[in-house]
């Protein structure tokens, strides 16, 4: 009998999506969000995400920060498609001994994030887990993107340059709870930098770069010396820590980020390699696997 | 410091919804689904729901049945608004020791339910809970209802009759895992029976009838002898067991369910009381409270 920890997350997802009707979604499981074409001027985006006590946040973590993170993670996924999140649904599964003040703080943190990014909470559900079980928070959201501006993971081409925003590694020292999703940055990159493929870095470059390349039907070459690292971090941390919530994107080799530095003076945009033909290039190991 | 188990689910939800922007939803937290008016011919419906191992299903439960139930619970909520579910998102938080065959069976059960009710899975997320923690499944869904046919909990009026479909109680003997959401029945009742308020019975009539009356700004009188009971069940079980997944509705006193028996020959529709003016009527205790 194989167990989840034997096969890892990506293989599991590949097995599961074959078992259910997934519809005519323009892009289904595998991208940051699902894309649904309802025929209007905007494409609908849908996303669900889970956070587990002891995995994504610690028992003693500040409730407001956990609430912020829960929504910001998902807003980051919408950003990575070039889109925006609009309405949220939250399910919290908690032990009965949880203090009411904690869940109130969690909701206040969600409220701050909703205000900051102009989204709304449409519904919520609370349920009880047995004593001793980890609290689980699940966030689902709807959003949208202009039909011509959606950026998928799968749009990269051999020869495209690979770029990241910001600096990677060391997220656990605090950033993972208090980051700002790159919404404006992603929309700028989709519009002015001809981004051909994009995703947000949640599981570490070592895990996510191969995903983007595979979705685009390409291999990749990474210029390790070029990877922008958080101060004090090693390359290994930069590749594998996860929860950077920066953008990874591909863009045509001749794309120039003219105006980026003026528009976003505090955030770097760094070329870290290129997409190459499938079967060429290199491999990367490491990064975060939920069941690895 | 008060704890969740001290204040109960309804009071908790009332406190939490004040802490976040909830938008201009036609009906927000408190009904079976959130209703969003995007200006089209149909109103959008949104819903999230949680299921916990050891609470909503047992560790050894058949995975396919759990998958069916996870979606059917939510389809039942959409039905109770007079609407249909369209796209689902699923987050499963599982221990790494879980057998792959279990989660595959769970997806197969979801697939059967999606096929039966014409809905699609738009996205999924798997994450790991620490060993020893209960598995948690969260389902979110989008759906819709014709603008003129939505039925809220809050539309009941003093003098309306109260009705339930089917028989109540004893769900744990099997029905809770293998029920059929009353989608066609609800749409028929909205159209032909002038249902003024409706909800699905998930936490037991003793908990849910006061909710419907309160949302409608009414009191209620329950004719206990009229409550249709599952064979072998006491009135106490019929009122408090929960997970009946039948419809509770209000309809004008002169409404006649002409044609019901021909259309749904195997399902009863029983008058069990009436809505009265707020402050009159009676009270009911019991039913399922997640934190009670």
Image (spheres, coloured by chain):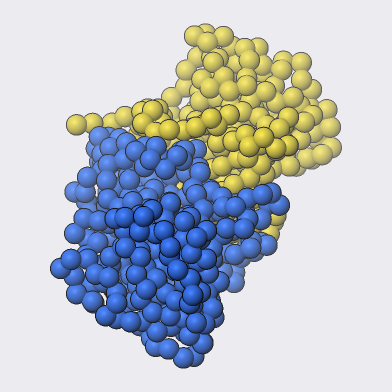
Chain colours: A blue, B yellow
- Give residue A133's position: percent from left, percent from top: 29, 53
Outermost residue to the left:
A232
Note whether residue B30 is visible: yes
- Displayed quadrant of residue B160: top right
Of A162 and B29, the residue lying toward us? A162
> A220 or B197: nearer the eye?
A220
- Nearer-the-camera pick, A260 or B258: A260
User: In front here: B114 or B244?
Assistant: B114
Q: Quadrant of residue A128?
A: top left
Q: Position of residue B233 (x, y in %)?
A: 55, 37
Residue A13 shows up from this direction: no
Residue B218 position, x and y percent, is: 55, 14
Q: Residue at x 28, y 67 (%)?
A: A168
For residue B251, side relative to residue B137 (left or right):
right
- Residue at image position (60%, 52%) is A146
Q: Residue at x 42, y 45 (%)?
A: A91
């Amino acid at each position: 009998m194989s167990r989840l920890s034997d096969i890892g997350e990506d293989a599991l997802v590949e097995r599961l999506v074959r078992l259910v009707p997934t519809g005519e979604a323009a892009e289904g499981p595998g991208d940051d969000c699902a894309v649904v074409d309802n025929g209007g001027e905007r494409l609908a985006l849908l996303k669900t995400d889970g956070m587990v006590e002891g995995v994504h946040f610690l028992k003693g973590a500040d409730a407001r920060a956990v609430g912020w993170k829960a929504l910001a993670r998902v807003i980051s996924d919408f950003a990575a498609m070039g889109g925006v999140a609009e309405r949220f649904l939250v399910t919290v599964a908690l032990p009965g001994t949880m203090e009411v003040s904690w869940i109130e703080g969690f909701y206040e943190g969600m409220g701050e994030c909703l205000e900051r990014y102009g989204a709304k909470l449409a519904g919520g559900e609370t349920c009880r887990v047995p004593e001793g079980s980890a609290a689980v928070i699940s966030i689902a959201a709807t959003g949208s993107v202009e039909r011509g501006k959606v950026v998928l993971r799968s749009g990269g081409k051999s020869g495209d340059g690979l770029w990241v925003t910001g600096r990677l590694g060391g997220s656990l020292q605090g950033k993972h709870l208090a980051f700002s999703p790159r919404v404006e940055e992603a929309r700028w990159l989709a519009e002015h930098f001809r981004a051909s493929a994009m995703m947000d870095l949640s599981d570490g470059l070592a895990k996510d770069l191969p995903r983007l390349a595979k979705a685009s039907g390409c291999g990749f070459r990474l210029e390790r010396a070029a990877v922008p690292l958080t101060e004090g971090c090693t390359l290994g941390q930069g590749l594998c820590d996860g929860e950077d919530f920066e953008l990874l994107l591909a863009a045509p080799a001749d794309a120039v980020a003219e105006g980026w530095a003026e528009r976003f003076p505090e955030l770097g945009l760094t070329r870290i390699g290129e997409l190459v033909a499938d079967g060429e290039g290199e491999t990367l190991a490491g990064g975060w696997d939920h069941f690895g």
